[in-house]
Amino acid sequence: MKSYSVVILESNAAIVSQLKSSLAEEKNLNVVYYGDDGDEGIKHVLELKPDLVMVGVFLKGTDGCGVVREIKKTHPEIKVIAMGIPNDSLIERIMGEGADYYLSKPFTISTAIERIYETVHNNDGKEAKQIVEKRKPLTIEEKISEIFISIGIPPHIKGYGYLREGIKMTIEKPCIINSVTKELYPSIAKKFSTAPSKVERAIRHAIEVAWNRGRIEAINAIFGARIYLGTEKPTNSEFIALVADKLILEKLV
């Protein structure tokens, strides 16, 4: 089966990291370049001539629209998936430049991979579906990571790992959420060889990072309701329970 080369041009480091690691697990997809500079990106695309370019709307130097324009001007055969906020004028503009698909943020990595296969297969839904169906189902860790990246919790901070572990423990043993201080934090601390108080602070910081980035709409979109408004933030236990409940319900469907 043919493999496809992919270039990722995106300013959100967390999205780039998640796309890179997820595409590395796909036998048919190979990331050949990634970066956040539009001018450098154009040079590499014209040199490498990949099968697909995933381009964010907002980049350093030349923006996503300019990148798409330059690519399609000389290499119309290269497929382009644009990534950006759900804004009608942005979508109309970048699609007008020749983008083959617009992926609205926030998106899950599994959705992105499905759109990639559909696009490189010239929107041949049947063939793309066959490839997607052969893929391994996402693990709990991957599903949690998708939620984190969508709401803006970066993977390099300590709270990321602590939060993920806390959610996994709560999925396996839901009643543990009722003993956060006496059982959950100490269990996470033991696994990471740290103190429960440091676990609590790091998790609180991770949640604050997401809220300070103003991802409230993304958060509400993921959980299917307007759960939070403005600067209102959940407690550590509320956030862990919210994500755990969502994933438990998905397993039951």
Image: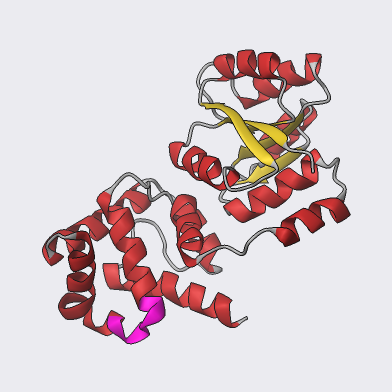
* Helix, strand or loop for the magenta stretch, by majority: helix
Residue drawn where x is 51% and y is 26% of the image: 36
Position of residue 225 relative to residue 64, above or below, is below
Residue drawn where x is 56% and y is 78% of the image: 251
Residue 10 vs residue 130: left or right?
left
Q: Quadrant of the N terminus?
A: top right
Give the magenta-colored segment's residue range: 170-176
Q: Residue 231 at what x, y percent from top left?
A: 34, 56
Q: Is residue 233 visible?
A: no
Position of residue 62 relative to residue 56, above or below, is above
Q: Is residue 76 visible?
A: yes
Q: Residue furthest front?
A: 1
Q: Residue 27 at what x, y percent from top left?
A: 66, 45
Q: Residue furthest bottom?
A: 175
Residue drawn where x is 75% and y is 35% of the image: 92
Quarter assignment of residue 193: bottom left
Quarter assignment of residue 131: bottom right
Q: Was residue 241 drawn as part of the magenta stretch in this picture?
A: no
Residue 53 vs residue 72: left or right?
left
Quarter assignment of residue 136: bottom right
Residue drawn where x is 39% and y is 57% of the image: 230
Q: Nearer the viewer, residue 156 or 99?
A: 156
Q: Residue 67 at what x, y percent from top left?
A: 66, 21
Q: Was residue 175 drawn as part of the magenta stretch in this picture?
A: yes
Q: Quadrant of the C terminus?
A: bottom right
Residue 171 vs residue 106: left or right?
left
